[in-house]
Image (spheres, helix red, strand yellow):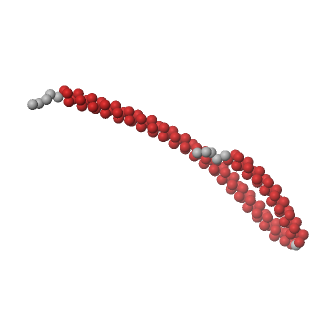
């Protein structure tokens, strides 16, 4: 299983987040300017909406950061468990080979004892 490259995803997200911050800030300034010029009393209403949007973005960013950290930890755990499963399969195969060898040796020994016992018995007539 391939490991998720969380470092690259984190760096891309950082640069996209920085660019989005500047674009969002420019949009807020443009919106406030256009509304303030038309109706000065709507500035508070518009600003409160943008503050709510910024708070939502901060919370989503925080949750996203935690999810990326969780995904990285789970990916490491899956890799460790996959290695453990591979080791256990190899050990199981080794034990199966040993068991087959012992079974073949015990059947050879049992056959030898049977043939010796049959030849040693006197025939009754």
Q: Residue furthest front?
A: 125
Q: Residue at x 76, y 53 (%)?
A: 16
Quadrant containing the C terminus in the rendered view:
top left
* In this picture, residue 22 sits left or right of residue 124: right
* In this picture, residue 122 sits left or right of residue 21: left
Q: Residue furthest right?
A: 37
**121 lies above or below 53:** above
Q: Residue at x 70, y 46 (%)?
A: 7
**Number of marks:** 0
Q: Residue at x 86, y 64 (%)?
A: 30
Q: Residue at x 81, y 58 (%)?
A: 23
Q: Nearer the viewer, residue 47 or 82?
A: 82
**56 lies above or below 113:** below
What percent of the width, then of the height, locates residue 4?
64, 47
What percent of the width, then of the height, locates residue 21?
79, 56
What percent of the width, then of the height, locates residue 43?
85, 69
Quadrant containing the N terminus in the rendered view:
top right
The quadrant where residue 83 appears = top right
* In this picture, residue 114 sits left or right of residue 71: left
* In this picture, residue 51 sits left or right of residue 123: right
Q: Residue furthest left?
A: 125
Q: Nearer the viewer, residue 81 or 116?
A: 116
**88 lies above or below 114:** below
């Amino acid at each position: 299983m391939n490991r998720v490259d969380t470092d690259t995803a984190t760096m891309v997200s950082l640069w996209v987040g920085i660019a989005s911050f500047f674009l969002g800030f420019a949009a807020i300034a443009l919106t406030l300017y256009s509304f303030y010029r038309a109706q000065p009393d709507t500035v508070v209403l518009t600003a409160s909406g943008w503050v709510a949007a910024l708070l939502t973005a901060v919370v989503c960013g925080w949750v996203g950061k935690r999810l990326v950290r969780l995904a990285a930890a789970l990916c490491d755990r899956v890799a460790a468990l996959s290695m453990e499963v591979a080791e256990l399969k190899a050990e199981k195969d080794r034990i199966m080979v040993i068991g087959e060898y012992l079974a073949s040796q015990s059947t050879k020994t049992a056959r030898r004892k049977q043939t010796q016992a049959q030849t040693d018995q006197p025939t009754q007539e």
